[in-house]
Image: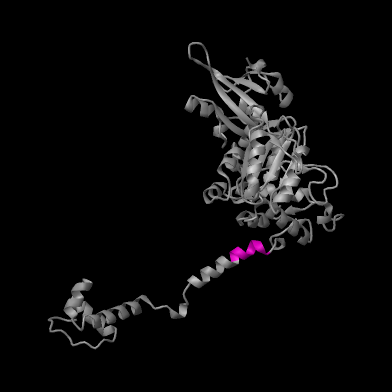
Amino acid sequence: MIDAIDKPAIFINQSYIIEAVNKPYRDTYPVDIKLGYSTCFSVSHRNTKPCDQCGEQCPIKVCQDTKRPASVVHVHATNEGQSYCDILMRPIYDSTGSLLGYLEVLDKLSFASNRPAPGKMVGESNAFKIMLNKINRAASAASADIAVLLHGETGTGKELVSRALHDTSARAEKPFVVIECTGLTDSLFESELFGYEKGAFTGATTNKKGLVDAAEGGTLFFDEIGDVPLSMQVKLLRLFETQTYRPVGSVNVKQANFRLVCATHKNLKEMVQQGTFRQDLYYRIAGFPITLPALRERQDDIELLANHILAALPQTHRPHTNRFPTKRFDKAALAKLKSYSFPGNIRELKNIIEQASLLADDSVIYEKDLPEQLFETQRASDSDVSQQIPDRSLLLTLEELESQYISDAYYQYQGDVAGLASALDVSARTLYRKLQKAGVKVKAPSLKGPL
Protein backbone atom coordinates (compact mmCIF):
# COMPACT_ATOMS: atom_id res chain seq x y z
CA MET A 1 0.00 0.00 0.00
CA ILE A 2 2.65 2.51 0.99
CA ASP A 3 4.78 1.90 -2.11
CA ALA A 4 1.81 2.78 -4.34
CA ILE A 5 1.73 6.35 -2.93
CA ASP A 6 3.64 8.84 -5.08
CA LYS A 7 4.17 11.28 -2.18
CA PRO A 8 6.49 10.76 0.80
CA ALA A 9 4.75 8.40 3.23
CA ILE A 10 5.43 6.31 6.33
CA PHE A 11 3.36 3.82 8.33
CA ILE A 12 3.37 4.25 12.13
CA ASN A 13 1.98 1.76 14.64
CA GLN A 14 0.03 2.65 17.76
CA SER A 15 3.27 2.95 19.75
CA TYR A 16 4.60 5.70 17.42
CA ILE A 17 7.11 3.26 15.85
CA ILE A 18 7.75 3.51 12.10
CA GLU A 19 7.14 0.17 10.41
CA ALA A 20 7.29 1.12 6.71
CA VAL A 21 8.73 3.91 4.54
CA ASN A 22 8.29 4.47 0.80
CA LYS A 23 10.98 5.61 -1.65
CA PRO A 24 9.67 9.19 -2.10
CA TYR A 25 10.03 9.69 1.66
CA ARG A 26 13.65 8.52 1.69
CA ASP A 27 14.39 10.70 -1.36
CA THR A 28 12.73 13.80 0.13
CA TYR A 29 13.68 13.43 3.80
CA PRO A 30 17.13 11.81 3.97
CA VAL A 31 17.16 10.56 7.56
CA ASP A 32 18.25 7.35 9.23
CA ILE A 33 15.25 5.16 10.06
CA LYS A 34 15.42 1.74 11.69
CA LEU A 35 12.14 0.09 10.82
CA GLY A 36 10.46 -1.42 13.86
CA TYR A 37 12.61 0.65 16.24
CA SER A 38 12.63 4.35 15.27
CA THR A 39 9.72 6.49 16.51
CA CYS A 40 8.15 9.17 14.33
CA PHE A 41 8.89 11.92 16.86
CA SER A 42 12.58 10.97 17.20
CA VAL A 43 13.05 10.88 13.42
CA SER A 44 11.04 13.98 12.53
CA HIS A 45 11.74 16.22 15.52
CA ARG A 46 14.68 14.67 17.39
CA ASN A 47 12.32 14.51 20.38
CA THR A 48 12.13 11.87 23.10
CA LYS A 49 8.34 12.27 23.49
CA PRO A 50 5.36 12.64 21.14
CA CYS A 51 4.66 16.07 19.68
CA ASP A 52 1.70 16.86 21.93
CA GLN A 53 4.01 16.48 24.94
CA CYS A 54 6.52 18.90 23.43
CA GLY A 55 4.25 21.86 22.77
CA GLU A 56 3.17 20.92 19.23
CA GLN A 57 -0.01 19.53 17.73
CA CYS A 58 0.27 15.78 17.20
CA PRO A 59 -1.79 14.50 14.25
CA ILE A 60 -1.82 10.97 15.71
CA LYS A 61 -3.36 12.30 18.92
CA VAL A 62 -6.00 14.15 16.87
CA CYS A 63 -6.77 10.92 14.98
CA GLN A 64 -7.10 9.05 18.27
CA ASP A 65 -9.50 11.66 19.66
CA THR A 66 -11.66 12.11 16.53
CA LYS A 67 -11.34 8.68 14.82
CA ARG A 68 -10.85 10.65 11.59
CA PRO A 69 -7.92 11.83 9.42
CA ALA A 70 -6.05 14.90 10.62
CA SER A 71 -3.71 17.41 9.05
CA VAL A 72 -1.06 19.71 10.49
CA VAL A 73 1.92 21.75 9.29
CA HIS A 74 5.15 20.79 11.05
CA VAL A 75 8.84 21.53 10.80
CA HIS A 76 10.73 18.27 10.31
CA ALA A 77 14.40 17.81 11.09
CA THR A 78 16.44 16.14 8.34
CA ASN A 79 20.10 15.53 7.63
CA GLU A 80 19.93 18.57 5.35
CA GLY A 81 18.37 20.87 7.96
CA GLN A 82 14.86 21.74 9.02
CA SER A 83 12.04 21.61 6.50
CA TYR A 84 8.37 22.60 6.54
CA CYS A 85 5.91 19.88 5.57
CA ASP A 86 2.15 19.54 5.36
CA ILE A 87 1.13 16.26 7.04
CA LEU A 88 -2.01 14.24 6.39
CA MET A 89 -2.47 11.46 8.95
CA ARG A 90 -4.99 8.65 8.36
CA PRO A 91 -5.95 5.86 10.79
CA ILE A 92 -5.72 2.43 9.09
CA TYR A 93 -8.03 -0.43 10.10
CA ASP A 94 -8.04 -4.13 9.22
CA SER A 95 -11.01 -6.06 7.81
CA THR A 96 -12.44 -6.54 11.31
CA GLY A 97 -12.34 -2.84 12.12
CA SER A 98 -9.35 -3.10 14.46
CA LEU A 99 -6.87 -0.23 14.33
CA LEU A 100 -3.53 -1.22 12.77
CA GLY A 101 -1.77 2.14 12.91
CA TYR A 102 -1.47 5.40 11.02
CA LEU A 103 -0.48 6.33 7.48
CA GLU A 104 1.39 9.63 7.32
CA VAL A 105 1.56 11.32 3.89
CA LEU A 106 3.73 14.42 3.59
CA ASP A 107 4.08 17.38 1.23
CA LYS A 108 7.37 19.23 1.51
CA LEU A 109 6.72 22.99 1.54
CA SER A 110 9.81 24.20 -0.25
CA PHE A 111 8.46 27.77 -0.44
CA ALA A 112 8.50 28.29 3.34
CA SER A 113 11.09 28.26 6.11
CA ASN A 114 11.36 28.74 9.87
CA ARG A 115 14.83 30.24 9.35
CA PRO A 116 15.93 33.34 7.42
CA ALA A 117 16.02 32.09 3.82
CA PRO A 118 16.27 34.09 0.56
CA GLY A 119 13.19 33.89 -1.65
CA LYS A 120 11.06 31.99 0.86
CA MET A 121 8.11 32.80 3.05
CA VAL A 122 9.39 32.97 6.61
CA GLY A 123 7.54 32.36 9.87
CA GLU A 124 6.67 29.88 12.61
CA SER A 125 3.48 31.22 14.23
CA ASN A 126 0.23 29.26 14.21
CA ALA A 127 -1.38 31.83 11.90
CA PHE A 128 1.51 31.38 9.46
CA LYS A 129 1.21 27.58 9.53
CA ILE A 130 -2.54 27.71 8.88
CA MET A 131 -1.86 29.87 5.83
CA LEU A 132 0.83 27.43 4.59
CA ASN A 133 -1.64 24.55 4.82
CA LYS A 134 -4.14 26.42 2.63
CA ILE A 135 -1.49 27.44 0.11
CA ASN A 136 -0.35 23.85 -0.24
CA ARG A 137 -3.88 22.55 -0.69
CA ALA A 138 -4.59 25.18 -3.35
CA ALA A 139 -1.35 24.38 -5.18
CA SER A 140 -1.74 20.60 -5.10
CA ALA A 141 -2.24 18.65 -8.30
CA ALA A 142 -5.84 17.77 -7.46
CA SER A 143 -6.83 21.45 -7.44
CA ALA A 144 -4.20 22.92 -9.76
CA ASP A 145 -6.69 25.03 -11.71
CA ILE A 146 -9.05 26.22 -8.99
CA ALA A 147 -9.28 30.02 -8.84
CA VAL A 148 -7.64 31.40 -5.69
CA LEU A 149 -8.55 34.68 -4.00
CA LEU A 150 -5.96 36.10 -1.62
CA HIS A 151 -7.37 38.53 0.91
CA GLY A 152 -5.29 40.53 3.33
CA GLU A 153 -4.23 43.99 4.38
CA THR A 154 -1.76 45.94 2.29
CA GLY A 155 1.78 44.72 2.84
CA THR A 156 0.97 41.17 4.00
CA GLY A 157 2.80 39.54 1.06
CA LYS A 158 0.03 38.66 -1.38
CA GLU A 159 2.31 38.62 -4.41
CA LEU A 160 4.79 36.36 -2.61
CA VAL A 161 1.96 33.93 -1.84
CA SER A 162 0.73 34.04 -5.43
CA ARG A 163 4.24 33.24 -6.60
CA ALA A 164 4.38 30.26 -4.22
CA LEU A 165 1.07 29.02 -5.60
CA HIS A 166 2.51 29.13 -9.10
CA ASP A 167 5.92 27.66 -8.28
CA THR A 168 4.45 24.63 -6.50
CA SER A 169 1.78 23.91 -9.10
CA ALA A 170 1.85 21.81 -12.27
CA ARG A 171 2.20 25.10 -14.20
CA ALA A 172 5.49 26.08 -12.55
CA GLU A 173 7.49 25.82 -15.80
CA LYS A 174 5.13 28.23 -17.57
CA PRO A 175 4.95 32.06 -17.23
CA PHE A 176 3.82 33.88 -14.11
CA VAL A 177 2.26 37.20 -15.20
CA VAL A 178 1.23 40.00 -12.84
CA ILE A 179 -1.56 42.44 -13.74
CA GLU A 180 -1.67 45.59 -11.63
CA CYS A 181 -5.35 46.57 -11.56
CA THR A 182 -4.94 49.89 -9.76
CA GLY A 183 -4.97 53.10 -11.78
CA LEU A 184 -5.74 51.62 -15.21
CA THR A 185 -8.43 53.25 -17.38
CA ASP A 186 -10.99 51.08 -19.13
CA SER A 187 -9.34 51.37 -22.54
CA LEU A 188 -5.81 50.88 -21.23
CA PHE A 189 -6.86 47.93 -19.08
CA GLU A 190 -8.49 46.18 -22.05
CA SER A 191 -5.57 46.73 -24.44
CA GLU A 192 -3.02 45.63 -21.82
CA LEU A 193 -5.01 42.55 -20.93
CA PHE A 194 -6.20 41.38 -24.35
CA GLY A 195 -3.70 43.03 -26.69
CA TYR A 196 -4.71 44.84 -29.87
CA GLU A 197 -4.64 44.66 -33.65
CA LYS A 198 -2.80 47.10 -35.88
CA GLY A 199 -4.99 50.13 -36.56
CA ALA A 200 -7.35 49.43 -33.63
CA PHE A 201 -6.79 53.00 -32.38
CA THR A 202 -4.48 55.95 -32.97
CA GLY A 203 -0.92 54.86 -32.29
CA ALA A 204 -1.58 51.13 -32.81
CA THR A 205 0.97 50.76 -35.60
CA THR A 206 1.59 47.04 -35.01
CA ASN A 207 -0.14 44.06 -33.47
CA LYS A 208 0.57 43.64 -29.77
CA LYS A 209 0.02 40.58 -27.61
CA GLY A 210 -1.77 41.09 -24.31
CA LEU A 211 -0.93 39.79 -20.86
CA VAL A 212 -3.43 36.94 -21.20
CA ASP A 213 -1.48 35.70 -24.19
CA ALA A 214 1.81 36.18 -22.33
CA ALA A 215 0.56 33.93 -19.50
CA GLU A 216 -0.27 31.03 -21.84
CA GLY A 217 -0.13 27.79 -19.85
CA GLY A 218 0.93 29.58 -16.66
CA THR A 219 -0.59 31.75 -13.95
CA LEU A 220 -2.34 35.10 -14.33
CA PHE A 221 -2.21 37.13 -11.12
CA PHE A 222 -4.64 40.04 -10.78
CA ASP A 223 -3.30 42.24 -8.00
CA GLU A 224 -5.94 44.44 -6.31
CA ILE A 225 -8.81 43.07 -8.38
CA GLY A 226 -11.20 45.18 -6.32
CA ASP A 227 -9.95 48.24 -8.25
CA VAL A 228 -11.13 46.91 -11.65
CA PRO A 229 -13.73 49.34 -13.08
CA LEU A 230 -17.29 48.02 -13.04
CA SER A 231 -17.50 48.45 -16.81
CA MET A 232 -14.58 46.03 -17.27
CA GLN A 233 -15.80 43.41 -14.83
CA VAL A 234 -18.23 41.82 -17.30
CA LYS A 235 -15.38 41.30 -19.79
CA LEU A 236 -13.26 39.70 -17.06
CA LEU A 237 -16.14 37.42 -16.16
CA ARG A 238 -16.43 36.28 -19.78
CA LEU A 239 -12.68 35.63 -19.90
CA PHE A 240 -12.71 33.64 -16.65
CA GLU A 241 -15.86 31.69 -17.49
CA THR A 242 -15.08 30.76 -21.09
CA GLN A 243 -11.26 31.04 -21.18
CA THR A 244 -11.71 33.04 -24.40
CA TYR A 245 -11.08 36.68 -25.31
CA ARG A 246 -10.85 39.00 -28.28
CA PRO A 247 -7.99 41.48 -28.82
CA VAL A 248 -9.00 45.12 -29.24
CA GLY A 249 -9.86 45.78 -32.89
CA SER A 250 -10.09 42.08 -33.78
CA VAL A 251 -13.08 39.99 -34.81
CA ASN A 252 -11.33 36.72 -33.98
CA VAL A 253 -11.84 35.00 -30.65
CA LYS A 254 -8.73 33.52 -29.07
CA GLN A 255 -8.47 30.65 -26.61
CA ALA A 256 -6.72 31.27 -23.28
CA ASN A 257 -5.02 28.81 -20.94
CA PHE A 258 -4.06 30.07 -17.49
CA ARG A 259 -4.55 29.49 -13.78
CA LEU A 260 -6.30 32.43 -12.10
CA VAL A 261 -5.05 33.98 -8.86
CA CYS A 262 -6.48 37.27 -7.57
CA ALA A 263 -5.65 39.46 -4.59
CA THR A 264 -7.29 42.37 -2.80
CA HIS A 265 -7.19 44.29 0.45
CA LYS A 266 -10.80 45.36 0.00
CA ASN A 267 -13.92 43.63 1.33
CA LEU A 268 -15.37 42.35 -1.93
CA LYS A 269 -18.55 41.04 -0.26
CA GLU A 270 -19.35 44.55 0.96
CA MET A 271 -18.60 45.89 -2.53
CA VAL A 272 -21.05 43.33 -3.97
CA GLN A 273 -23.75 44.60 -1.58
CA GLN A 274 -22.94 48.20 -2.55
CA GLY A 275 -23.14 47.36 -6.25
CA THR A 276 -19.51 48.23 -7.04
CA PHE A 277 -18.38 44.64 -7.66
CA ARG A 278 -20.28 42.02 -9.62
CA GLN A 279 -21.59 39.14 -7.55
CA ASP A 280 -21.10 36.59 -10.35
CA LEU A 281 -17.49 37.73 -10.79
CA TYR A 282 -16.86 37.43 -7.05
CA TYR A 283 -18.00 33.82 -6.92
CA ARG A 284 -15.94 33.03 -10.03
CA ILE A 285 -12.66 34.33 -8.56
CA ALA A 286 -13.24 33.13 -4.97
CA GLY A 287 -13.07 29.41 -5.69
CA PHE A 288 -10.53 28.94 -2.90
CA PRO A 289 -10.16 31.99 -0.62
CA ILE A 290 -7.03 32.35 1.49
CA THR A 291 -6.76 35.01 4.19
CA LEU A 292 -3.28 36.34 4.83
CA PRO A 293 -2.81 37.24 8.50
CA ALA A 294 -1.72 40.74 9.43
CA LEU A 295 1.70 41.05 11.06
CA ARG A 296 0.10 41.98 14.40
CA GLU A 297 -1.48 38.49 14.29
CA ARG A 298 1.98 36.96 13.78
CA GLN A 299 3.79 38.48 16.75
CA ASP A 300 5.86 35.30 17.20
CA ASP A 301 7.26 35.83 13.69
CA ILE A 302 8.48 39.42 14.08
CA GLU A 303 11.96 38.57 15.35
CA LEU A 304 12.41 35.88 12.69
CA LEU A 305 11.16 38.18 9.92
CA ALA A 306 13.35 41.04 11.16
CA ASN A 307 16.47 38.87 11.00
CA HIS A 308 15.37 37.50 7.61
CA ILE A 309 14.99 41.01 6.18
CA LEU A 310 18.24 42.19 7.78
CA ALA A 311 20.18 39.29 6.28
CA ALA A 312 18.79 40.07 2.83
CA LEU A 313 19.84 43.74 2.82
CA PRO A 314 22.53 44.62 0.26
CA GLN A 315 25.96 45.69 1.46
CA THR A 316 25.08 49.32 0.76
CA HIS A 317 22.87 49.19 3.84
CA ARG A 318 25.83 48.29 6.03
CA PRO A 319 28.10 51.27 6.73
CA HIS A 320 31.68 50.42 7.73
CA THR A 321 31.32 47.01 6.08
CA ASN A 322 34.97 46.17 6.55
CA ARG A 323 34.76 46.66 10.31
CA PHE A 324 31.27 45.33 10.87
CA PRO A 325 30.41 42.80 8.12
CA THR A 326 27.11 41.73 9.71
CA LYS A 327 24.49 43.40 11.85
CA ARG A 328 22.26 42.10 14.60
CA PHE A 329 19.51 43.44 16.82
CA ASP A 330 19.86 44.38 20.47
CA LYS A 331 17.28 42.67 22.72
CA ALA A 332 15.62 45.97 23.56
CA ALA A 333 15.30 46.82 19.86
CA LEU A 334 13.64 43.47 19.16
CA ALA A 335 11.29 43.99 22.11
CA LYS A 336 10.32 47.38 20.70
CA LEU A 337 9.61 45.85 17.29
CA LYS A 338 7.42 43.19 18.89
CA SER A 339 5.38 45.81 20.76
CA TYR A 340 4.56 47.76 17.58
CA SER A 341 1.27 47.17 15.71
CA PHE A 342 2.68 47.47 12.14
CA PRO A 343 -0.28 49.00 10.28
CA GLY A 344 1.80 48.63 7.09
CA ASN A 345 2.55 44.96 7.87
CA ILE A 346 5.65 43.25 6.43
CA ARG A 347 6.26 46.05 3.94
CA GLU A 348 6.48 48.51 6.84
CA LEU A 349 8.74 46.15 8.81
CA LYS A 350 11.12 46.00 5.85
CA ASN A 351 11.13 49.80 5.61
CA ILE A 352 11.84 50.14 9.35
CA ILE A 353 14.73 47.68 9.27
CA GLU A 354 16.31 49.35 6.24
CA GLN A 355 16.22 52.69 8.07
CA ALA A 356 17.56 51.20 11.32
CA SER A 357 20.39 49.48 9.48
CA LEU A 358 21.47 52.78 7.98
CA LEU A 359 21.17 54.64 11.30
CA ALA A 360 23.13 52.08 13.34
CA ASP A 361 26.71 53.17 14.02
CA ASP A 362 28.12 49.68 14.55
CA SER A 363 27.23 46.04 14.17
CA VAL A 364 24.41 46.21 16.72
CA ILE A 365 21.07 47.86 16.00
CA TYR A 366 19.91 49.46 19.24
CA GLU A 367 16.49 50.80 20.21
CA LYS A 368 17.72 54.34 19.55
CA ASP A 369 18.39 53.38 15.92
CA LEU A 370 14.74 52.53 15.24
CA PRO A 371 12.62 55.10 13.35
CA GLU A 372 10.47 57.64 15.17
CA GLN A 373 7.19 56.00 14.16
CA LEU A 374 7.75 53.16 16.66
CA PHE A 375 7.78 55.65 19.53
CA GLU A 376 4.92 57.92 18.46
CA THR A 377 2.24 55.51 19.68
CA GLN A 378 3.92 55.23 23.09
CA ARG A 379 4.22 59.01 23.39
CA ALA A 380 0.55 59.43 22.50
CA SER A 381 -0.37 56.78 25.06
CA ASP A 382 1.76 58.45 27.73
CA SER A 383 0.09 61.78 26.91
CA ASP A 384 -3.38 60.27 27.28
CA VAL A 385 -2.44 58.77 30.64
CA SER A 386 -0.98 62.04 31.89
CA GLN A 387 -4.20 63.85 30.95
CA GLN A 388 -6.20 61.34 32.96
CA ILE A 389 -4.11 61.85 36.13
CA PRO A 390 -5.56 64.80 38.12
CA ASP A 391 -3.39 67.62 39.43
CA ARG A 392 -2.33 66.65 42.96
CA SER A 393 -2.68 70.26 44.09
CA LEU A 394 -6.40 70.08 43.26
CA LEU A 395 -7.07 66.85 45.14
CA LEU A 396 -9.13 66.83 48.38
CA THR A 397 -8.41 64.57 51.29
CA LEU A 398 -11.09 62.04 52.21
CA GLU A 399 -11.82 64.04 55.38
CA GLU A 400 -12.24 67.26 53.37
CA LEU A 401 -14.40 65.47 50.82
CA GLU A 402 -16.66 64.12 53.59
CA SER A 403 -17.04 67.54 55.18
CA GLN A 404 -17.97 69.11 51.84
CA TYR A 405 -20.52 66.37 51.13
CA ILE A 406 -22.16 66.62 54.57
CA SER A 407 -22.30 70.40 54.34
CA ASP A 408 -24.05 70.28 50.96
CA ALA A 409 -26.43 67.59 52.16
CA TYR A 410 -27.32 69.62 55.31
CA TYR A 411 -28.44 72.61 53.24
CA GLN A 412 -30.27 70.27 50.82
CA TYR A 413 -32.24 68.91 53.82
CA GLN A 414 -32.86 72.52 54.95
CA GLY A 415 -31.33 71.95 58.38
CA ASP A 416 -33.30 68.79 59.19
CA VAL A 417 -30.52 66.99 61.13
CA ALA A 418 -32.70 64.06 62.16
CA GLY A 419 -33.91 63.47 58.61
CA LEU A 420 -30.38 63.71 57.16
CA ALA A 421 -28.97 61.41 59.84
CA SER A 422 -31.62 58.82 58.98
CA ALA A 423 -30.81 59.12 55.24
CA LEU A 424 -27.08 58.73 55.90
CA ASP A 425 -27.70 55.85 58.35
CA VAL A 426 -25.77 57.51 61.18
CA SER A 427 -26.84 58.72 64.60
CA ALA A 428 -27.90 62.35 65.06
CA ARG A 429 -25.05 62.82 67.56
CA THR A 430 -22.45 61.61 65.04
CA LEU A 431 -23.89 63.82 62.29
CA TYR A 432 -23.95 66.88 64.57
CA ARG A 433 -20.30 66.36 65.48
CA LYS A 434 -19.32 66.05 61.80
CA LEU A 435 -21.32 69.17 60.91
CA GLN A 436 -19.46 71.12 63.60
CA LYS A 437 -16.14 69.86 62.21
CA ALA A 438 -17.21 70.95 58.73
CA GLY A 439 -17.85 74.48 60.06
CA VAL A 440 -21.61 74.33 59.60
CA LYS A 441 -23.50 76.48 62.12
CA VAL A 442 -26.27 74.32 63.44
CA LYS A 443 -28.30 74.54 66.60
CA ALA A 444 -27.37 71.78 68.97
CA PRO A 445 -30.12 69.16 69.38
CA SER A 446 -31.65 68.60 72.80
CA LEU A 447 -29.96 65.27 73.33
CA LYS A 448 -28.83 63.76 76.58
CA GLY A 449 -25.27 62.66 77.05
CA PRO A 450 -22.03 63.95 75.53
CA LEU A 451 -21.86 64.64 71.86
Which quadrant: the C terminus?
Answer: bottom left
Quadrant assignment, res 79: top right
* Left or right: 449 in relation to 245: left
Would residue 171 be found to the left or right of residue 128 on screen?
A: right
Residue 35 placement: quadrant = top right
Front one among 120 and 44: 120
* In this view, 146 is above or below 394: above
Q: Which residues are magenta?
A: 372-378
Q: How is the image coloured?
A: one colour
User: Which corner quadrant holds the N terminus?
Assistant: top right
Residue found 29% across the figure and 83% down from its top: 438
Task: Residue at 26%, 80% (x, y): give it.
Answer: 434
Q: Residue 297 location in percent, x, y?
A: 58, 48
Label tally = 0
Q: Main secondary structure of the magenta part?
A: helix
Residue 395 visible? The answer is: yes
Which percent across, then down, holds residue 251?
74, 38
Q: Is residue 253 above or below residue 27?
A: below
On the image, the x and y values in percent for residue 13 come to 57, 19
Which is more toward the observer, 130 or 289? 289
In the displayed image of the protein, which residue is found farthest to the top? 95
Foreground residue, 18 or 408? 408
Res. 6 image quadrant: top right
Q: Residue furthest right?
A: 322
446 over 308 or under it: above or below: below
Does residue 181 belong to the magenta stretch?
no
In the image, what residue occupies the spot 72% across and 34% down? 256
Res. 117 visible in picture: no
Task: Please state the horizontal and vertical placement of residue 366, each as a whole percent of the image.
Answer: 71, 59
